[in-house]
Amino acid sequence: MRLVAIGGSAGALEALRALAAPLRPDLDMAFLTVIHSSPRHETKLPQLLARVSAVPAHVAADGDHIERGHMYVAQAGMHLIVNDGRLRVMMGPKENAYRPSIDVLFRSAAQVAGRDAVGVVISGSLDDGSLGLAAIKAHGGITMVQDPDEAAVPDMPRNALQSSAVDYVLPAADIGAKLIELDAAPDAGTFDNVVASRVPVDSNGMPSEEDFGQPSAFVCPECGGTLWELDGERTSHYRCRVGHAYSADTLITEKEGTLEASLWTAVRSLQEQADFMKRIADRARRSNAQHRVLRNFEKKRAQAIAARDAVRSVLQRLGAEEARADEVQAEGAVGIPGAGD
């Protein structure tokens, strides 16, 4: 049996439906799927897939035995990993700011199924799944990526192509057809005969302490711990001792969010300081305090307001620069055949 791990994010629903449409329950394959979604809403993927595919789809439950001809969908807000022929649904550390994470699923599939693993990256933003796809390739598995020119959001497929050698780059519907073709190959896998798991059940499959890499000068946006840099074949990634992990692009995005939050905290603190100085000045005025004391409070209030406005100006510039960057990216996407179709 082959283990097919599929990952996507923004724009992935239609790609997944197109991929799943030709699949049949008699295929000697099991399908595991992580699509980024809100952790506050129960996934509706099984119902949506049932409308287009004959393969039974279920929300994965912890301890599920993996059966051929079935598709298992990650629960909202929980990692999905493979362990000794069964599924584990776990509240592990976020990777690339997501839980479930595509990298977590792909890495566990690579470690357990080896050459019988198939990794598939479809439409999405940023680059979750890129390192996991490289792990599947390194373990002898087969790798597939949706053609970025067809993907609604091409970032994830493009980053996957840059991070690892990929066996097939295809439109989503052709990925399903290629999986059927692989099923007919004489070297169909022996994953179901694997006895011992190589993925610790209490982890998300990250490297051991000995493989921690080098400490960086950065801290984890999630918990504030030191980030350690691990060098991959084509790119570096970062993780803390808790297990939060980031690609370089995701770390940049998370740091930008942390910076904005810090700046808004500064605005709030300065506004509170200005309000407090005004209250103290009003009390001093009512009590006929010395002019020197009153001027001191009013001066501190004016300084707080000036500092608040300066920080707000920085936030405005950051917002304008982000908007311009989004416009440039959108203009670039216009020239991509199939983008936004």
Image (cartoon, rainbow, N blue to C red):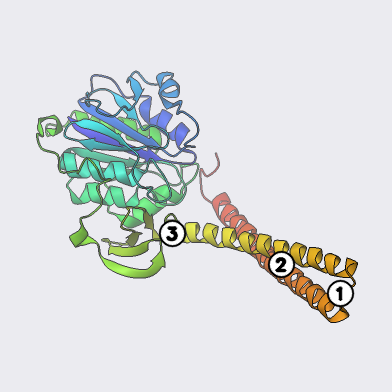
Among the two numbered marks 1 and 2 on one chain, the one whose residue lies closer to the N terminus: 1
* Image spot of residue 216 (x, y percent): 35, 69
Where is mark 3, residue-wise? 251
Residue drawn at x 43%, y 47% is 148
Q: Quadrant of residue 325?
A: bottom right
Front residue of 222 and 284 = 284
Front residue of 174 and 190 = 190
Residue drawn at x 20%, y 25% is 28
Which is more foreground, mark 1 or mark 2? 1
Give the label on residue 308, or none. 2
Q: Residue furthest front?
A: 287
Which is more foreground, mark 3 or mark 2? 2
* Image spot of residue 308 (x, y percent): 71, 67
Q: Is residue 70 left or right of residue 281?
A: left
Among the two numbered marks 1 and 3 on one chain, the one whose residue lies closer to the N terminus: 3
Q: Is residue 163 visible?
A: yes
Disc 1 marks which amino acid?
Answer: Ala
The local secondary structure at tag 3 comes to helix
Q: CA distance from mark 3 to mark 2?
A: 28 Å
Disc 2 marks which amino acid?
Answer: Arg
Disc 3 marks which amino acid?
Answer: Leu
Q: Is residue 109 left or right of residue 152?
A: left
Where is mark 1, residue-wise? 289
Front residue of 283 and 245 = 283
Is 6 rendered above or below residue 95? above
